[in-house]
Amino acid sequence: MSCSPEEWQTRVDLAAAYRLVALFHWDDLVFTHISARVPGEDDAFLINPYGMLFEEITASSLVKVDSQGNKLSDSTYPVNPAGFVIHSAIHSARHDVQCVLHTHTLNGVAVSAQREGVLPISQQSIFVLSSLGYHDYEGVALRDDEKPRLVQDLGDCSYLMLRNHGLLTVGKTIADAFQAMYLFESVCAIQIRAQAGGGELVRVPSAIISTARQQAAQVTKGMGGNLAWPGLRRRLDREMPGYAI
């Protein structure tokens, strides 16, 4: 297909993210979505062709749309209307964000149904809690009037728990959004298992949580998701190749 080198690289990375979500079993048939802003185009982003399994998605199959939902590239597939509402709202408001990733995993939805949400009971949880918002459930996200509330609840956070619905992460890169989701999903899985154990849970002190962002920068050497991304791509090339076409 014809596009700029920058758009093609974004397409390859986004297709890789879709395949990795499938590889990690975070997909929900065809009913969740990841989007990425097209470099150099303020009003254009890429999203999945609605109807393709995540394990089938390739760089060239991604659909390019504008903030009004108009297709900017040829595709026989539609765009998930709920996906468009959520992702267009965030891309329009958060110009610091390239990628928005949303899942409906069993662990994520289970924790999203709990009144307290994420509990400070693991090392992983402190990083999520340092940049976490919550958005109350309003039904399937089909209405434009939900957009301002969604954006307000996300604020400048990297993590958003959609109550009774699932998880959402944003990142300055596709790699950052993916790594954030890996952490968010891990936090939820740990919480559900800890609660299932039946014992009293030990909470991390709030003073430690307040320094989590600085600790995260040290752990990733300031590289964020890009520290793990090359290795994830190598794993994908071994186990689920064919996305970069």
Image (cartoon, helix red, strand yellow):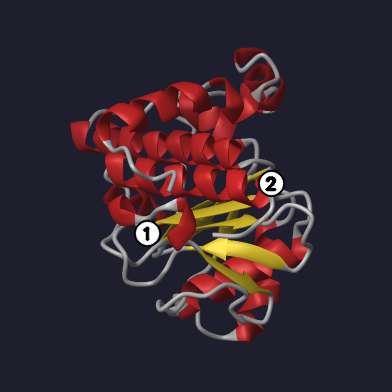
The residue under label 1 is 113
Compared with 44, 130 (above or below) is above
Q: Residue at x 42, y 68 (%)?
A: 49
Compared with 25, 32 (above or below) is below
Q: Position of residue 163 (x, y in %)?
A: 46, 62
Question: In terms of sequence position, does the residue under pointer 2 or pointer 1 come before the other?
Answer: 2
Q: Residue at x 61, y 72 (%)?
A: 65
Of the residues shown, which amino acid type is indicated by label 2?
Glu
Of the residues shown, which amino acid type is indicated by label 1?
Ala
Q: Residue at x 63, y 26 (%)?
A: 224
Compared with 38, 152 (above or below) is below
Q: Is residue 60 left or right of residue 127?
A: left
The residue under label 2 is 6
Label 1 element class:
loop
Q: Nearer the viewer, residue 138 or 57?
A: 57
Q: CA distance from mark 2 to mark 1?
A: 39 Å
Q: Residue at x 52, y 75 (%)?
A: 74
On-image quarter of the N terminus = bottom right
- Pointer 2 local density, CA inside 10 Å: few below 14, some 14–19, many at least 20: few
Q: Position of residue 14 (x, y in %)?
A: 51, 48
Label 2 element class:
helix
